[in-house]
Image: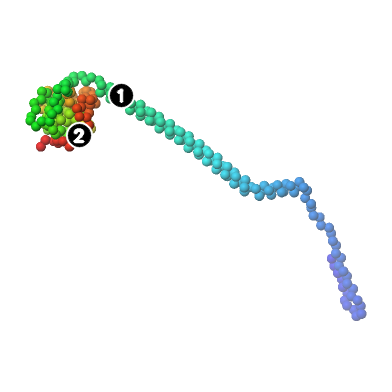
Amino acid sequence: MSFRCSGPRTGDIPHVVVPHVVVTHVVVPIRGSRQLFAEGHTMAQKSKSPSAERKARIEEMRRAQHASERRNRILTIAVSAVVVLGLVGFGAYALNKKSDQKAAADAPIKGEKDWDAAKLGRNHVTEQVKYPMKPPVGGDHNQVWMNCDRDVYKDAIPDMNAVHALEHGAVWVTYNDKASAADVKTLSDKVKKTSYSLMSPYKDQAGTIMLSAWGKQLSVKTADDPRVNQFFTRYVQGPQTPEPGAACTGGMDAPQ
């Protein structure tokens, strides 16, 4: 575009050259319907993508939670099974042990001596009683029992108080000078672990080691004789006890 103007002259009309304006057409592309649909679909997808991602995350969390719940259920079932098996095994063990103890208690004890309990006096007396056996296994006795709750006495104890302990269901372990120190310790350890039992030396008894209960007595040579355990199993608070459950404490302690 250009214009031209000549200098002014007096009386002349200015000559003005009007610039030429060339207008060209502008081409505006018109998108096809398919392109518009595709672009609209893409925009819709972009607008929906955050929502889809949230749904995906939620679904993933649900799957993880379900997997965790399944693992917990499996773990619970496994632990329960182990507990049940353990209880069954322990129950079987306890039943077998109880059965073995009952068998031991019912089996006859070789060499055991017994006296008719009906003929053994149970009166409380103050005068000295002369018993027909040593150590005594029953008869009239002092009104105060010898403490027999795992009591081990280093010196001899009075017969009349010890017999009262037998009436309460105790087992009395005695030994003479022929017993070895090892056997005395073994028996002492056993008595210290067994309620309703007591132990003391008894110089003029016939056997090296003797075990006495109400109306029952056994002699053994060594502490590892299996009949020792058998005697304890059967007669500590056993069926021979005239006063089952009576106290083994609160009586007479070591002689002064």
Residue 36 location (% of width, % of height):
75, 49
Q: What amino acid is at disc 1?
A: Ser
Toward the bottom, the furthest residue is: 10
Say which quadrant the C terminus sits in.
top left
Q: What amino acid is at disc 2?
A: Ala
Residue 214 location (% of width, % of height):
17, 26
Q: Of callouts 2 and 1, which one flags the residue occurring earlier in the amino acid sequence? A: 1
> How many badges with numbers are in the image?
2
Mark 2 → mark 1, Cα distance in angstroms: 28 Å
In terms of secondary structure, where does tag 2 sit? loop
Residue 140 location (% of width, % of height):
12, 28
Indicate the quadrant where residue 195 lies: top left
Which residue is painted at 16% across and 36% down in the image?
251
In this picture, is 80 found above or below 119? below
Q: In this figure, which residue is indicated by the disc labeled 1?
A: 99
Residue 156 in sight in this render: no
Residue 43 in sight in this render: yes
Say which quadrant the N terminus sits in.
bottom right
Q: Looking at this view, is 144 or 35 the one in front? A: 144
Which residue is painted at 18% across and 19% down in the image?
111
Indicate the quadrant where residue 99 lies: top left
Q: Which mark is residue 247?
A: 2
In terms of secondary structure, where does tag 1 sit? helix
